[in-house]
Image (cartoon, rainbow, N blue to C red):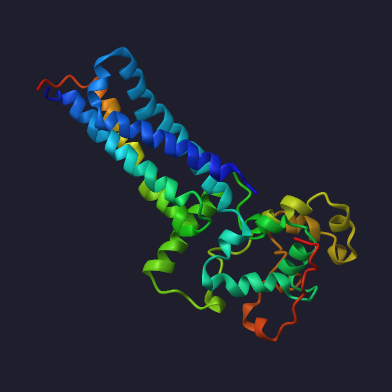
Amino acid sequence: MTATLMERRIRWSGLLIVVGLLFQMLTLPLTHPLAFVGFLFLGCPLVAAGMLFFLYSLISNDKE
Amino acid sequence: MNTTPLILISFTAIAAALGLLTALRPELTRVRGGKILAFMSLCVLPALGMWAGVNEHLERSTSTQFCLSCHVMADFGKSLYVDDKSYVPAVHFQNHFVPVDHACFTCHTDYTLFGDYKAKWRGVHHVLVQYLGKIPKPEDIKLYTAYNNRECLHCHAGMRKYEEASSHHKNPEMLAQAATNQLSCISSGCHDTVHDVTTIKDATFWTPKASGK
């Protein structure tokens, strides 16, 4: 069964979120300025992008 | 031991696992349960994890250990242990007038509505300089703007010892001038020995007893 456009978008948003969360997880045990900057400027944007893409996929009206 | 990071890591790992499940099996969203799973794993859990993580990192970034983790700050850290009562930061640190674990941030944040965030934004700039720019010598590090008495008065205002000290009444207007920043606490010749890293090599140091922090 082929994936619909919505499912492909969910896959991409899921992957973005997972990569972002993994990066956040790596920084959490560290008390260092690089960990702080990495969390804020790499982990958070990836997760936020995934979430926004998921929400966009819910409200978009695009057909295949 | 602080368990918050462990709880956060576990929470993030669970959110990532559910996110991965949704990403690898998007066809699950064809049924109602899958739709709920997708909403939780791609929206609610990551948002909660991000909020908690930002709070944890912000809290941790106010710690003395965090501020002194860059090599260039080492001399400033040492100045907290100078055995000389004229060193303002040393007196505050050694007598626990400031929280020992948050010593730097207590004096180097702005006590204004967005002061903490401004201080952190300046910190991000410091990280960029540390890794991408030219690191200055410790003695060349200066404050962006003159130290504001507001930061001192955040604790000292209303304090009996501060208000009744004879040295604060050399001039009847002294306290009023300090309150309005017309007279600086640290650069008007009164409490002017701050970190003084240029002479730190010749200083003698206080060693905390093992029972202390």
- Seen as rendered, the residue at the extreme left is A64
Question: Relative to B166, is A45 on the left or the right?
Answer: left
Question: Relative to A37, is A54 on the left or the right?
Answer: left
Vertical placement of B168 versus A55: above or below?
below
The residue at 78%/58% (across/down) is B97
- Seen as rendered, the residue at the extreme bottom is B202
Vertical placement of B160 versus B171: above or below?
above
Q: Write down the quadrant of residue B167 in the picture.
A: bottom right
x and y, in percent, of residue B179 in the image: 73, 54
The residue at 38%/70% (across/down) is B133
Q: Write down the quadrant of residue B76 in the picture.
A: bottom right
B165 or B97, which is in the foreground?
B97
Q: Is residue B188 visible?
A: no
The residue at 20%/25% (across/down) is A7
Vertical placement of B80 versus B58: above or below?
below
Question: Relative to B162, is B120 on the left or the right?
Answer: left
Question: Relative to B135, is B160 on the left or the right?
Answer: right
B87 or B83, which is in the foreground?
B83
x and y, in percent, of residue B152 in the image: 72, 57
